[in-house]
């Protein structure tokens, strides 16, 4: 009986270490999509750091980096974030608002997940822009303007990663 508890404790410890490693990898991937420390203007080593950066508002450079990394035009980016292009253009000399930064984080998180699942380059970019039957004929990029839509896109990417039909 003691050996069972020891084995269970070791298994839980391994799961915990794997989860922590995965969370750190996910954070690094999202920070990379946001343009890294250079664009963000500070190091982000934890979810708490990222949460604070979102609350303070991302610098405009992050917006430029996400556009470059995603292959999106300003119009496409504004549409995905459910913002007007004019709102994004006005932010050139100041930080984004908290809600804009949060939406940009959501987009960066899904970009990182798509790259991890579909690979680097054009494949992930094309997938985000094409209509998807699992989303009711809407492109993933168009669906992420809400949290529910973003979760649906995450779910589809998870099914693709694990061999499901999407």
Image (tube, rainbow, N blue to C red):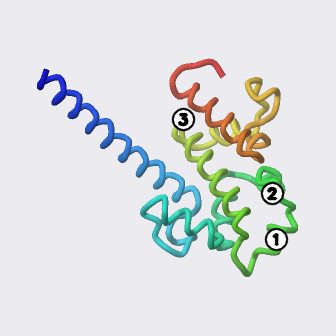
Could you say whether the residue bearing mark 2 is in a helix, strand or loop?
helix
State the residue position of label 2: 78
Callout 3–callout 1 Cβ contact below 8 Å: no
Identify the residue at the far bottom of this view. Answer: 93
Count neighbours of disc 3 (C-alpha within 10 A) and say few if under 14, some if 14 to 19, many if 20 or more: some
Indicate whether 53 appears above or below 147: below
Tell me how many marks there are: 3
Of pointers 2 and 1, the one earlier in the residue sequence: 2
State the residue position of label 3: 117
Callout 2–callout 3 Cβ contact below 8 Å: no
Of pointers 3 and 1, the one earlier in the residue sequence: 1
Name the quadrant of the C terminus: top right
Q: Report whether 19 appears left or right of 112.
A: left
| Residue 44 x/y as whole percent | 47, 66
Indicate whether 125 appears above or below 161: below
Of pointers 2 and 3, the one earlier in the residue sequence: 2
Residue 157 numbered tag: none
| Residue 82 x/y as whole percent | 82, 54
State the residue position of label 1: 89
């Amino acid at each position: 009986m003691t050996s069972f508890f020891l084995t269970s404790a070791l298994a839980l410890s391994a799961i915990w270490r794997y989860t922590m490693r995965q969370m750190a990898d996910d954070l690094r991937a999202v920070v990379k999509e946001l343009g890294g420390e250079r664009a963000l203007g500070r190091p982000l080593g934890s979810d708490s750091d990222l949460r604070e950066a979102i609350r303070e508002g991302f610098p405009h450079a992050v917006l430029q980096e996400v556009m470059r990394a995603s292959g999106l035009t300003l119009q496409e980016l504004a549409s995905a974030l459910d913002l007007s292009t004019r709102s994004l253009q006005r932010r050139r000399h100041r930080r984004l608002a908290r809600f804009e930064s949060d939406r940009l984080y959501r987009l960066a998180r899904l970009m990182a997940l798509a790259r991890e699942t579909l690979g680097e380059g054009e494949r992930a970019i094309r997938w985000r822009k094409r209509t998807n039957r699992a989303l009711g004929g809407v492109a993933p990029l168009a669906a992420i303007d809400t949290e529910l839509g973003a979760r649906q896109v995450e779910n589809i990417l998870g099914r693709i990663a694990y061999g499901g039909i999407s």
